[in-house]
Image (cartoon, helix red, strand yellow):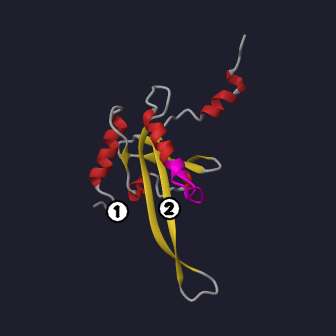
Amino acid sequence: MDGDGFEEAELDALEHVVRDTSAEPMKLSLPLVKHITNDFSGESLIGEGGFSKVYLGVLPSGSRIAVKRILSSHTMDERPFRREIDTTRKAAHKNIVRLIGYCSHTEETPIKCEGQRGYIYAEMRERLICIEYVPNGTLDTHITDESAMDVR
């Protein structure tokens, strides 16, 4: 096991999935995803929306992937997460980003409540979807870029 809590073989398998476009997406451990995103650091943040933040994951080979971290308040219902994985997996096309992997991690964490003697245990959820990284910005940027719309 690596010092960061994941197996080196898992990192090698992820490198393989990124390189081989015919490889199946893989389930990833949370320690591995934290490792490639520098523990979801601010420097790795490349975008955010109402339900998620997107981080740049960098592999030892230099390959890059986008890691969509679904905000924990939106993970109570697992169906949208599973649906997005299934839909992205099935949508194999050169103009659609490819699903690289996903992470579904749940951990019970003790939380001290004010006025209470003990702790309550809350489920802390991490739901992450790893997709092919496209370095030229978002589709929204390209659609609304007026400088590129010279229609003469």
Q: Residue at x 64, y 87 (%)?
A: 115
Q: What span is colored magenta in the figure?
A: 69-81
Q: Quadrant of residue 141?
A: top right
Queried whether the magenta region covers residue 80, the answer comes back as yes
Q: Residue at x 43, y 30 (%)?
A: 92
In the image, residue 75 lies at what x, y percent?
Answer: 55, 56
Mark 2 or 1: in front is: 2
Q: Secondary structure at mark 1?
A: loop
Tell me the tag on residue 5.
1
Q: Residue 99 falls in which quadrant of the image?
A: top left
What type is the residue that disc 1 sits on? Gly
| Residue 40 vertical placement versus 112 (above, below) | above
Q: Is residue 103 left or right of residue 122?
A: left
Identity of the residue furthest to the top in this view: 152
Q: Is residue 72 above or below residue 141?
A: below
**Residue 140 in the image: x percent, y percent?**
64, 33
User: Helix, strand, or loop for circle 2?
Assistant: strand
**Which residue in the protein does label 2 denote?**
125
Alpha carbons under labels 2 and 1: distance apart: 18 Å
User: Would you call the spot at circle 1 few (<14 residues within 10 Å), some (14-19), or many (20 or more)?
Assistant: few
At label 2, counting other C-alpha atoms closer than 10 Å, the crowd grade (few under 14, some 14-19, many 20 or more) is some
Looking at the rendered image, the quarter that the C terminus falls into is top right
Q: Position of residue 37 (x, y in %)?
A: 46, 52
Q: Nearer the viewer, residue 91 or 29?
A: 91
